[in-house]
Amino acid sequence: MSDHIPMRVAVVGATGFQGGAVARLLAERGHRVRTLTRRPGADRPELAGVAFVQGDLANPHHVGRLFDGATHASVVMPLEYDPEKIRTYARNLAEGAAAAGIARLVYNANTRVPAETTNVAAFETRRLAESVLREGLRDSSVELVVLRPPVYLDNLFSPWNGPALVAEGVLAYPLPADTPVAWISHRDLAEAVHAALTVEGAAGRTYDIGGARTVTGAELAAAFGKGLGRDVRYVPLPADVFEQGLTQVVGADAAAGVAGIYHYMASGASPRLMADDGGTSAQALSLKPAPVDEWVSRQPWQIWSDDATDAPSQD
């Protein structure tokens, strides 16, 4: 499908960071976007050009309203790691998409998924969602495309990383320093979703999307140093310390789910899980992700500076 033909896209997860990036990009490009949310109007993020449907993924009638009149769908699951809830969400989404006659549904697994099953809820609930979607859409006309991204650069532009990066040149993250990672930004994720919604030959495919190149902790720090114009050193943060901090923000259950990925990576069970796929996905989707240093140079790091009130604004 040509990306010049406007789509009517149901975006699941648009009130979150990843889905929000997708919704914004689609709206910017003239597509009609609708999302489902449990949040009241006053608690919703600013999403220009996005229509909201009040409801819950657990309710098939709410999901049906989301898909009514839509031509395409983009799905990312919430920070929920209970298998039965995820099974219900995925089943409702598959049935709703099939009933509405959606042309193509792009499922962002939010993470890479190991080839072998694990005891990590963050992997297995996303594997489960993909399985339920495939099964539920198998006899329908809906095309399914699956994206499996690695780790997001935007995680590093945060109150936990920004001040230390700006003031001390310290980049702390819960991955071993020698772990190769194809870091990707939310914006480039959105580009990948847009491509997966539109390119020919993507139906039924799974893409391990990633950033411009794979880097270790030291190489990531060097790219940040180039982008920031200062020396930066990488410090591997223990996964349990990361989990404790995240608990204060998203709650214990969600924090344990997210941190499970980092506990797994620290174990060394699959050291290249977050690395690139040799450019296969980027070529298939015609993607050109921004290099890390270029992404860094675009961020308004001055907001984390002690002199933030005196810092010039960035266009």
Image (tube, rainbow, N blue to C red):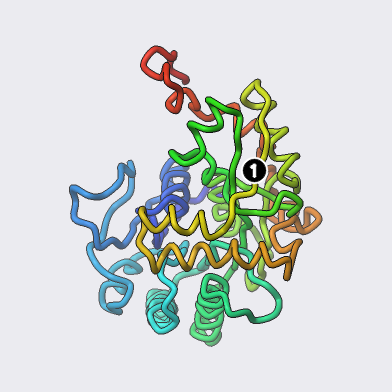
* Image quadrant in which you'd find residue 81: bottom left
Q: Secondary structure at mark 1?
A: strand
- x and y percentages locating residue 308 in the rendered image: 41, 19
* Image vertical order of residue 255 relative to residue 234, above or below: below
Q: Is residue 188 visible?
A: no
- x and y percentages locating residue 77 in the rendered image: 44, 67
The N terminus is located in which quarter?
bottom right
- x and y percentages locating residue 87 in the rendered image: 43, 82
Identify the residue shown where x is 57% and y is 72%.
123
Residue designated by label 1? 235
- x and y percentages locating residue 225 in the rendered image: 67, 28
Q: Is residue 167 visible?
A: yes
- Counting every numbered tag in the picture gives 1
Identify the residue shown where x is 30% and y is 42%.
46
The answer to which of 121 and 164 lies nearer the viewer is 164
Identify the residue shown where x is 66% and y is 43%.
289
How packed mark 1 is, by other alpha carbons closer than 10 Å (few <14, some 14-19, many 20 or more), is: some
Q: Amino acid at mark 1?
A: Val
* Image vertical order of residue 77 relative to residue 315, above or below: below
* Image vertical order of residue 216 relative to residue 226, above or below: below
The answer to which of 290 and 172 lies nearer the viewer is 172
* Image vertical order of residue 175 relative to residue 215, above or below: below
The answer to which of 13 and 1 lies nearer the viewer is 13
The answer to which of 220 and 106 lies nearer the viewer is 220
Q: Is residue 141 left or right of residue 275?
A: left
